[in-house]
């Protein structure tokens, strides 16, 4: 599914793709792919994110086979230089989840250009979770690649995790967070990866020889 591929940001306000309490699932070899960019100049509380999951939305790959469907999200916040900010690439919040057993999970997000800042590449909050349930050599891996927006405002984090019980979890699958802070000019707090509020958790529960690494790489 591809929404607003040209990155248009006319007078209308919209997030590229919103899953509001919805479920998208693959139970076989079919992949799930979402690509979108937000549009319009933000007028709070309207958000112009690339992709947003909220209100217990879920994306799931349930097959245990080695060719299980993969999950890929690529979101970009609105390119409009709106004055409020909060133009994030991918937002997962409000109890929403992305889960898989054997199909890899890859999420790429690039924050928008809102001059108010807080244009996150990837934002997880309010009980959001990304989980790999798989064990053994075919366990799903988790990759988050976030880049903060090119904004003169502050807080353009590459990856932001906030709120209680916001988790990234695996059994044997590897977890890799790659975050690059954004920002231009004099804005502050342009962290590659920003995690707040324990017990937000990044963890692997596997104990065998096939357990994957956890890599957190922020610049």
Image (cartoon, helix red, strand yellow):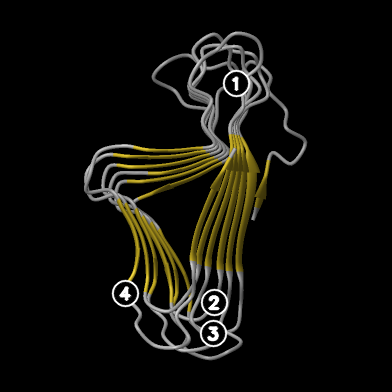
Q: Quadrant of residue 79?
A: top right
Q: CA distance from mark 4 to mark 2?
A: 18 Å
Q: Which residue is mark 2?
A: 103
* Circle nearer the viewer, 1 or 4: 4
Q: Which residue is mark 4?
A: 205
- Relative horizontal placement of residue 212, taking residue 77 as reference (left or right): left
Q: Which residue is mark 1?
A: 12
| Crowd rating for badge 3 (residues with CA inside 10 Å; few <14, some 14–19, many 20+) | some
State whether residue 57 is above or below residue 88. below
| Crowd rating for badge 4 (residues with CA inside 10 Å; few <14, some 14–19, many 20+) | few
Q: Marks 3 and 4: CB-CB under 8 Å? A: no
Q: CA distance from mark 1 to mark 3?
A: 38 Å
Label 1: which secondary element: loop
| Crowd rating for badge 2 (residues with CA inside 10 Å; few <14, some 14–19, many 20+) | many
State whether residue 59 is above or below residue 187. below
Residue 43, x across and y down, in percent: 47, 14
Q: Which residue is mark 3?
A: 28
Residue 62, x across and y down, in percent: 43, 80
* Circle nearer the viewer, 4 or 2: 4
């Amino acid at each position: 599914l591809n929404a607003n591929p040209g990155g248009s940001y006319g007078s209308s306000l919209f997030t590229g793709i919103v899953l509001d309490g919805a479920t998208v699932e693959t139970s076989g070899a079919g992949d799930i792919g979402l690509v979108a960019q937000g549009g319009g100049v933000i007028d709070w509380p309207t958000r112009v994110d690339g992709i947003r999951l909220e209100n217990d939305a879920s994306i799931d790959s349930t097959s245990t086979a080695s060719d299980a469907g993969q999950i890929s999200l690529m979101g970009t916040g609105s390119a409009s230089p709106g004055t409020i900010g909060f133009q994030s690439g991918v937002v997962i919040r409000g109890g929403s989840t992305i889960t898989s057993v054997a199909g890899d999970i890859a999420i790429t997000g690039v924050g928008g250009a809102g001059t108010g800042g807080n244009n996150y590449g990837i934002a997880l909050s309010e009980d959001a979770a990304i989980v790999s349930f798989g064990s053994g050599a075919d366990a799903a891996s988790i990759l988050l690649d976030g880049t903060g927006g090119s904004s003169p405002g502050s807080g353009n984090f590459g990856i932001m995790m906030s709120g209680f019980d916001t988790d990234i979890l695996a059994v044997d699958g590897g977890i890799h967070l790659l975050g690059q802070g954004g920002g231009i000019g004099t804005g502050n707090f342009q962290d590659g990866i920003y995690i707040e509020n324990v017990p937000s958790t990044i963890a692997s529960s596997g104990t065998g020889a096939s357990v994957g690494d956890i890599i957190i790489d922020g610049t």
